[in-house]
Amino acid sequence: MRRSGIPKRDGFHVTAPKPERAYLVAVDPRRRSGWDAEESLDELAQLAETAGAEIAGSAIQHIDTPNPKSYVGKGKLAEIVSERDELQYDTLILDDELSPSQQRHLEDATGIKVIDRTALILDIFARRAQTREGRLQVELAQLEYLLPRLAGQWSHLERLGGGIGTRGPGESQLETDRRLIRGRIGRLKEQIERVRRHRSLYRRNRARQGLPTIALVGYTNAGKSTIMNALSGAGVQAEERLFATLDPVTRRVELAPGRAVLLTDTVGFIQKLPTQLIAAFRATLEELDDADLLLHVIDITHPAAGQQRLSVQATLAELGLSTRPFLELLNKVDLLTTPDGRPVSGLEELRDLQESLERDRTEALMVSGVRGWGLDAVRSRIGRLLDNAEAGAGSGGLPPDQNGGRA
């Protein structure tokens, strides 16, 4: 007899689990600066879908600051809970990193799983990590995120009210878990340190070739890997999805006959990038330390392109790279339209757009990694910037007016 409620296909019961239905929540401080709350929530939805969730609904609360107890206010939380019967969501995702107490309060109030933006990004990185190095770095970030939240795993003992039957085991198990996680964190850091030393040796060996090094940086899904492939023929995985690249890839690129550079593709950045990830991926991001020039790839078609650009600059500053010479590449111009509303269809119209940029005293270059448009200009500009760097090496590197336009 067939059990009810289980669909059948080709004689077999379908056992694949249903995707989680997620309800998204963001707080929009009245004195906010930077990202628009709706744009940030749209990005959170894209992250959730990348992690395999279905979006059941969303809410934004406009308040001065996030509620220290429950992230949103009491009334908004009641509205969110009341919508659960209608929307049938089973996961609540918040657009900021929650404190352990905020997470526990929301779980108690809703009775469902609650995760924050940091946990969501860590989950995506765990899905994307392919190499041993990538998996080590992601596991370290996850454990450092989990450690201060361990107490919540034992909150069921608190509800018993103490007394007979609750003394000892809960606390000892919690301390055991903490000790095991701290031990694992220590071993992971040792292994990542070995990776860091190996990468350092590898970079020194590359330096002996005497070739300048260029690093691609940018917001996730800006098209860095596509440009890497177009410039070098590297065959790097390039997909329209978040965090398609986690492990750096370095290839030789010919700028002109007899002149070559080494080009490295790196992990994409994102707003509110978890500090645990920056710390865990420091061994990988050290590839940027030795770069003679950074190519900052920007998706010019994205509605939040300006904020994405600022987010990348803020992350570079956090890594101590804000003064590194760089050149901005405005990518995906093949998706733009001309002033009369037609799609950009070739190099002539691209040159017109580039000339309009130069009239606005903007040093960025317009390119299309998919079409290969503008890449000759990129090679030429890289050559000039490197020449300027070599000429100015005795006076501290590139002059400000040759530093990609903006600091």
Image: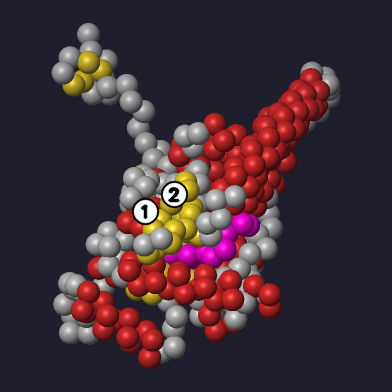
Task: Examine the rendering and report whether any part of residue 46 can be seen.
Answer: no
Compared to residue 128, the image places residue 58 above or below, namely: below
Badge 2 marks a residue whose secondary structure is strand
Q: Amino acid at mark 2?
A: Arg
Q: Residue at x 37, y 64 (%)?
A: 256
User: Do labels 2 and 1 touch, CB within 8 Å?
Assistant: yes
The amino acid sitting under disc 1 is: Ser
Q: Residues within 10 Å of mark 2 (few under 14, many from 20)?
A: some
Q: Position of residue 101 (x, y in %)?
A: 69, 47
Q: Position of residue 387 (x, y in %)?
A: 52, 73
Q: Disc 2 and disc 1: Cα gap in Å?
A: 7 Å
Residue 251's disc is 2
Q: Residue furthest front?
A: 258
Q: In terms of secondary structure, where does tag 1 sit? A: helix
Q: Nearer the viewer, residue 272 or 308?
A: 308
Say whether residue 147 is left or right of residue 22. right
Span shown in magenta: 289-300
Q: Residue furthest bottom?
A: 359
What label sits on residue 232 in the rendered view? Answer: 1
Residue at left 44%, top 58%?
260
- Using the image, determine if residue 315 lies above or below residue 306: above
Magenta stretch encompasses residue 36: no
